[in-house]
């Protein structure tokens, strides 16, 4: 997934959402903000929103598998 352009701000948002989810405290606001950021970034860069989300979640949730 090294061909996916991912800004650090998007990774930070997903880290926040993942931490909240792990704590059982994910808010609608956080979830919506992350999804909106995925959508906006994908549209701005011409990438698949699904692939952007998949790549970010891999970085955040499975850093040992990151091949970037």
Image (cartoon, rainbow, N blue to C red):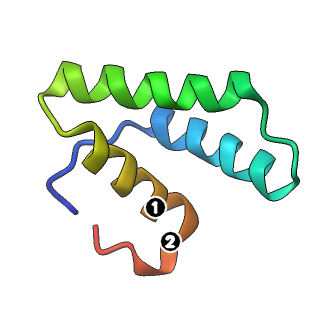
Quarter of the image for residue 50 reads top left
Q: Position of residue 12 (x, y in %)?
A: 58, 40
Q: In this view, does 40 lie above or below 24?
A: above
Image-based side of 51 in relation to 56, left or right: left
Image-based side of 5 in relation to 36, left or right: left
Q: In which quarter of the image is the N terminus?
A: bottom left
Mark 2 is surrounded, within 10 Å at the Cα level, by few (under 14), some (14 to 19) or many (20 or more) other residues, namely few
Q: Where is residue 48 in the image (x, y as percent from the top left)?
A: 19, 40
Quarter of the image for residue 27 reads top right
Q: Are marks 2 and 1 in contact (CB under 8 Å)?
A: yes
Q: Residue at x 50, y 71 (%)?
A: 63
Q: Which residue is drawn at 21% across and 19% down?
A: 44
Between 58 and 7, which is closer to the camera in this rendering?
58
Q: Residue at x 14, y 54 (%)?
A: 3
Q: Position of residue 23 (x, y in %)?
A: 87, 54
Q: Residue at x 41, y 79 (%)?
A: 65
Label 1 sits on a secondary structure element that is helix
Q: Mark 2 points at which residue?
A: 63
């Amino acid at each position: 997934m090294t061909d996916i352009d991912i800004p650090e701000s998007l990774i930070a948002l997903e880290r926040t959402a993942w931490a909240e989810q792990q704590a059982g405290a994910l808010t609608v606001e956080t979830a919506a903000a992350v999804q909106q950021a995925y959508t906006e970034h994908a549209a701005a860069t011409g990438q698949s929103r699904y692939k952007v989300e998949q790549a970010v979640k891999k970085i955040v949730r499975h850093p040992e598998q990151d091949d970037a």
